[in-house]
């Protein structure tokens, strides 16, 4: 059952860069979302009118961010900035995805969560066909944004997802 959650209020990506549209279901361990933004001619990841499958990693990363924000909100916490630091075991079954009719389904499963890091597995599919899958790691906290003087001890500088 689709849950009415405003995805854009949960992640820093706004406007056309907010690629995910609907939360289908989520729990503390996983999330499933759907979107039709792969077909939008205004998709900012398109190049020469095409959307390469490599960009499905961003869809997976945004699913992770939505899931993390929902988990924190459910626990009464505030959203923490994070930086994607690693993609591993990424595989694609197509080169381009903009012409696929219907919605993409984006799934993320939290494999490990600590106060300063998250590790996820993500999958993007269309009509039951797996399009992309992989694992990703995120560093959390103000230090992930390169903000000095923060109490976080992760020691990593970067930019927000």
Image (cartoon, rainbow, N blue to C red):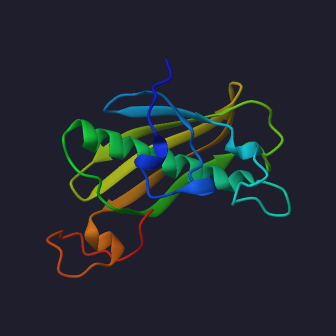
Q: Nearer the viewer, residue 161 or 84?
A: 161
Residue at figure coordinates x 84%, y 41% from the top left: 99
Residue 2 picture location, percent across and down: 50, 23
The quadrant in which residue 22 appears is: top right
**Relative side of 119 to 148, left or right:** right
Quarter containing the C terminus:
bottom left
From what the image shows, is residue 73 above or below residue 14? above
Q: Could you tell whether 151 is left or right of 78 in the image?
A: left
From this view, report whether residue 53 is shown above or below residue 127.
below
Q: Position of residue 20 (x, y in %)?
A: 56, 43
Choose between 97 and 5: the one closer to the eye: 5
Q: Name the residue furthest top.
A: 1
Question: Residue 1: where, in percent of width, then height?
Answer: 49, 17
> Which residue lies most toward the bottom here?
148
Relative horizontal placement of residue 126, taking residue 14 as reference (left or right) = right
In this view, the residue in front, 73 or 133, is 73
Residue shown at the point (74%, 55%) measured from the top left? 42
Residue 110 placement: quadrant: top left
Total numbered labels placed on residues in the image = 0
In this view, the residue in front, 38 or 133, is: 38
Q: Position of residue 106 (x, y in %)?
A: 57, 37
Give the residue drawn at x 79%, y 46%.
98
Residue at 25% x, 36% y: name it. 74
């Amino acid at each position: 059952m689709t849950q009415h959650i405003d995805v854009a209020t949960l992640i820093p990506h706004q406007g056309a860069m907010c690629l995910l549209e609907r939360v289908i279901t989520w729990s503390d361990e996983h999330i499933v979302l759907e979107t039709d933004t792969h077909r939008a001619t205004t998709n900012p990841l398109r190049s020469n009118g095409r959307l390469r499958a490599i960009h499905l990693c961003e869809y997976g990363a945004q699913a992770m961010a939505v899931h993390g924000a929902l988990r924190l909100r459910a626990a009464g916490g505030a959203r923490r900035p994070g930086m994607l630091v690693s993609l591993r075991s990424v595989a694609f079954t197509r080169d381009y995805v903009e012409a696929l009719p219907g919605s993409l389904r984006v799934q993320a499963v939290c494999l490990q969560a600590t106060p300063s890091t998250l590790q996820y597995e993500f999958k993007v599919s269309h009509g039951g066909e797996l399009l992309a899958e992989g694992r990703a790691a995120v560093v959390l906290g103000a230090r992930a944004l390169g903000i000095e003087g923060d109490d976080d001890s992760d020691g990593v500088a970067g930019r927000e997802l």
